[in-house]
Image: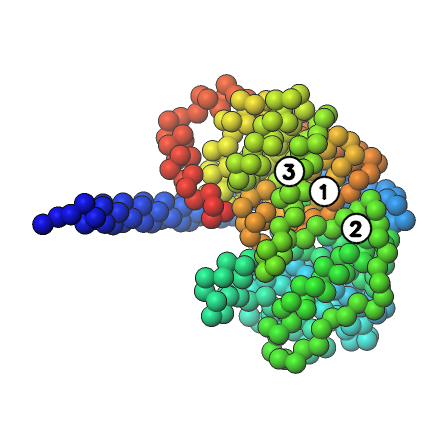
Amino acid sequence: MFTSSNVAARALRVVRKTLLRLLAIQLAVAAIMSLVDSYRRRGKKPKPFPVTPPSTVEVGDGTVTTYTFGKDLYADMLAAIEGAQRQILFETYIWKGDETGERFKAALAAAADRGVEVYCIYDGFANLVVSPVFKHFPDNLKVLRYPVYAAGWRFFDLARYGRDHRKILVVDETVGFVGGYNIGSAYETEWRDTHMRITGPAVWDLKRAFADFWNLNRRRRLRASERPLLLETASTWEPRIRVQRNVPRLWMFPIRSMYIEAINRASRNVWLTTAYFTPDQDFVDAMRHAAQRGVDVRLLLPLKSNHIVADWISRGYFTQLLDAGVRVFRYKDAMVHAKTATVDGTWVTVGTANIDRLSLTGNYEINVEVIDESLAKQLEDVFATDETNCLELTSLEWEARDLHRKFTEYFLAPLRPLL
C-alpha cells in the first residue's frame, strides 16, 4: 500500500536522479566543447594588438606605473629582482617552465645566491602541466607550493577550496607589482593584460598581503617548523590607495563589495574590462541600474577567451545588459586577460580578480583600489585604445543569433556557480 509520504519520497528520488543526470550531461558537453576548442587552437597564433606604453603618475607619496604589454612589465620586474638588496616576495598563479619562466627562476636564484632573502609562492593546481623538473628549486629559495587539494580531512569546509590566483612581487619594500599577468612566454607577447608597479607607502600593503598568505599556509612546506614571515616595521597608510584581498579561509570577500559599491555610486561612467564574466545577479543588477540612470556603462571582454565554456556562459547575461543600455565590446584576435575598471574619472581598480564567481567569492585574489584622477585618465586612455581592437555587440545583432546558440547558452546556464 502506498502512502502519500512514500509517493513523495519516490518523486523526490526521481527528481534528484534527473537533475544529477542533467548536470552530468552539462559537464560532459562542457568537457567536449573544451577539447574541441583546444584542438582547433593548435598551431594558431594571436594577431598583433594595440598597446599603451608604460606610463607613470604620482599618487600621494608614491607613484603608480601601468603596463599593458608583458615584455615591458617583465623587463621591469626582472630589473627589480636583479637590483634587490634584502628581500624578494614573489607570488604567481601560473609559472610556466618555458624560457620566460626560466628567466624568472634564474633571477630569483641569483638573488638568493648573493644573500637576498627570497620567498616564492605558486599554485599547485594551476601548474599541474608544468614539468616537475622545473619545480625543483635551489635550497636557498623559500618556496611554498599551494597544494592542489588544500582541505585535508575537512572535505565539507568550502573555505579551504579556493585557489591562489594572486600575482604579487615586492622588492625591498621600495617597489611592488600587482595585476593580471602570470609568468610565461605566451603572456609576454601574445596576451593583453594589465599590471601595476607601485612605489611609496602602499608597497607595505602588498608586503602584508604576501606575509599573511605565507603565514596562513607556511606549514604546507616540507619543513613543519617553518618560521612565520614577520614584518619588521609598521606600515604607513596611503589614503588614496587601498589593497583589497579575498581570503576564503577567513570568509573575507571585499572585492565584490568594492565593485558593486563603486558601480552604485557612479554618476558619469563605468568602464569594466574582464577576462571572464559570470557574475551573480546582484552584480548584473548594479550594472543595469547604473545604465538605466544614464551612466555610460561599458563591458570589455574577449571575443574568444582561452575558456570556451566561460564564453558561452557569459553570453547568457548579454540580453539583460544590452536591454538596459550597457555597451558590450568584444576584444578580437588576442586574449584580453586584464581585470580593471574606472568610474567617473576618479576611481580605479587593477588586480587579479575576474568578474566571475570563482574570483569574487572563491579564490584568493588581490585588487588595488585607487582614488586618483590622473590614474583614472590613464586607465580610460587604455580602455579607449582597447576599444579600437573590439567589435561592439548591438542588440539587433544579438537578437538575430541562431536558435542553437540560444539553446546552448540556456543549457549551460546552470554551470554558472561553478565558474
The local secondary structure at tag 3 comes to helix
The residues bearing labels 2 and 3 have C-alpha atoms spaced at a distance of 25 Å
Kindly report which numbered mark, 1 or 2, lies closer to the viewer in this rendering: 1
- Identify the residue position indicated by label 2 in the image: 197
Name the residue: 59% across, 60% down: 249
Name the residue: 80% across, 47% down: 241
Q: Nearer the viewer, residue 337 or 233?
A: 233
Q: Is residue 289 above or below residue 83?
A: above
- Percent position (x, y) of residue 171? 80, 62
Q: Is residue 217 above or below residue 301?
A: below
Q: Nearer the viewer, residue 407 or 13?
A: 13
Q: Which mark is residue 357?
A: none
- Percent position (x, y) of residue 202? 82, 53
Q: Quadrant of residue 330?
A: top right
Q: Earlier in the sequence, mark 1 or mark 2?
A: 2
The residues bearing labels 1 and 3 have C-alpha atoms spaced at a distance of 12 Å
Amino acid under disc 3: Ile
Q: Nearer the viewer, residue 126 or 289?
A: 289
Amino acid under disc 2: Arg
Crowding at label 3, few (<14), some or many (≥20) Cα neighbours within 10 Å? some
Does the CB distance between marks 1 and 3 fall below 8 Å? no
Q: Earlier in the sequence, mark 2 or mark 3?
A: 2
Kindly report which numbered mark, 1 or 3, lies closer to the viewer in this rendering: 3
Crowding at label 1, few (<14), some or many (≥20) Cα neighbours within 10 Å? many
- Identify the residue position indicated by label 3 in the image: 260
User: Left of 22 or right of it: where is 152?
Assistant: right
- Identify the residue position indicated by label 1 in the image: 349
User: Left of 379 or right of it: where is 18?
Assistant: left
Q: Is residue 262 visible?
A: yes
Q: Is residue 103 visible?
A: no
